[in-house]
Image (tube, helix red, strand yellow):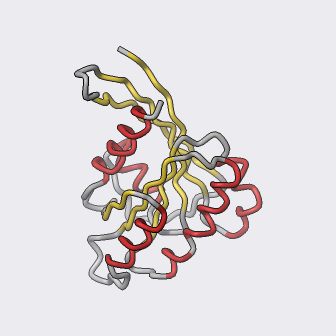
Amino acid sequence: MRTVSKKVCLLGDFAVGKTSLARRFVYDLFDDKYISTIGVKVSRKTVAVPMQDGAVVELTMMLWDLAGSEDFSQMRGSYMRGSAGAILVCDLTRPESLLSLEGYLADLRQVTPEATIILVANKSDSPEQRLLLTRVEEAAAALGATCFVTSARTGQNVEEMFRHLGRVLVESA
């Protein structure tokens, strides 16, 4: 079995759910307490990725959860360097979080222009959604990115989103 390791960054404003998405995928856990990420937190998960030819590739995803605070913006690019993929996360309860993804993407493209991009609209379980899904889909289309609507709380589409990205990363390796 072929083994591949890929670096993936989770990018977006503070409190959009980057850490919660990583925790749900890696540990299948969700924590209601919000603790802001300081700097970067790295997690990893190995998954089997079935290929079209019937082969299976063992993919280790190194998930770099980067702080969304302004204080960290000067250093963010150095942590993005070498990423094969990036998950741009916005919060369905905070429409402005979608707009700020342009800045994160610009930073990423400066250091890793070839990285595969996924756009994630998180907190689909929240009754306080204020961001229209059509706006998210339009933003994803403009970026040439696949779009997923997720809930780290319930697990909705989290595994599917990471596995989709994993398959794309393995196929492009």
Q: Where in the figure is residue 28, as x and y percent of width and height?
A: 31, 46
- Residue placed farthest to the right in the image? 74
Q: Which residue is more in the foreground, 117 or 129?
A: 117
Say if 41 sits above or below 48 in the image.
Answer: below
Q: Where in the figure is residue 161, as x and y percent of width and height?
A: 33, 51
Say if 30 sits above or below 122 in the image.
Answer: above
Q: Which residue is more in the foreground, 34 or 78?
A: 78
- Residue placed farthest to the top in the image? 1
121 vs 64, left or right, is left
Say if 67 sits above or below 103 in the image.
Answer: above
Q: Where in the figure is residue 123, as x and y percent of width and height?
A: 34, 69
Q: Where in the figure is residue 33, as x and y percent of width and height?
A: 43, 65
| Residue at 51% over, 34% down | 6
Say if 129 sits above or below 138 in the image.
Answer: below
Among the 4 quarters of the image, the one containing residue 14? bottom right
| Residue at 29% over, 22% down | 56
**Where the N terminus falls, by quadrant?**
top left
| Residue at 45% over, 82% down | 95
| Residue at 31% over, 30% down | 49
What is the number of callouts on the image?
Answer: 0
Among the 4 quarters of the image, the one containing residue 73? bottom right
